[in-house]
Image (cartoon, grey):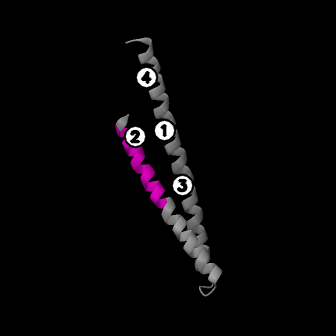
Amino acid sequence: MGKGDTTEKLVEDSSISIDQKLIEEGTAQLTSEIQVLETWLKELDASDDSDAEVVAARKSYSDMLQSRKEMLSTLAKQAKLQAVAD
């Protein structure tokens, strides 16, 4: 094993730990955003459904919520793949 092999191994190990850290931070961020969007949607449920702004906000928040849930699901799959690779 040459000196370059050791350097490559260190780079690989630090890359894996960085990836894991990013996955953890991304998961926390998405979970927080999902909670906020769900709260906003509950608040809108008490609003007037005939108000165009309320309808538009509900649609927008629902779309954002769906998007965040899909990203969280993808991130969870990535975390599983990362765990298998380790």
- CA gap between label 3 and label 2 equals 19 Å
Give the amino acid type for the residue marked by disc 4 in the picture: Lys
Q: Secondary structure at mark 1?
A: helix
Label 3, residues with CA under 10 Å away: few <14, some 14-19, many ≥20 = some
- CA gap between label 4 and label 2 equals 17 Å
Looking at the rendered image, the quarter that the N terminus falls into is top left
Give the amino acid type for the residue marked by disc 2 in the picture: Gln
Tag 2 or tag 4, which sits nearer the N-term? Answer: 4
Residue 49 percent location from the top left of the image: 59, 85
Of discs 3 and 4, which sits in the foreground?
Answer: 4
Label 2, residues with CA under 10 Å away: few <14, some 14-19, many ≥20 = some
Looking at the rendered image, the quarter that the C terminus falls into is top left
The residue that label 3 is drawn on is: 30
Tag 4 or tag 1, which sits nearer the N-term? Answer: 4
Of discs 4 and 2, which sits in the foreground?
Answer: 4
Query: In the figure, 9 relative to 49: above or below?
Result: above
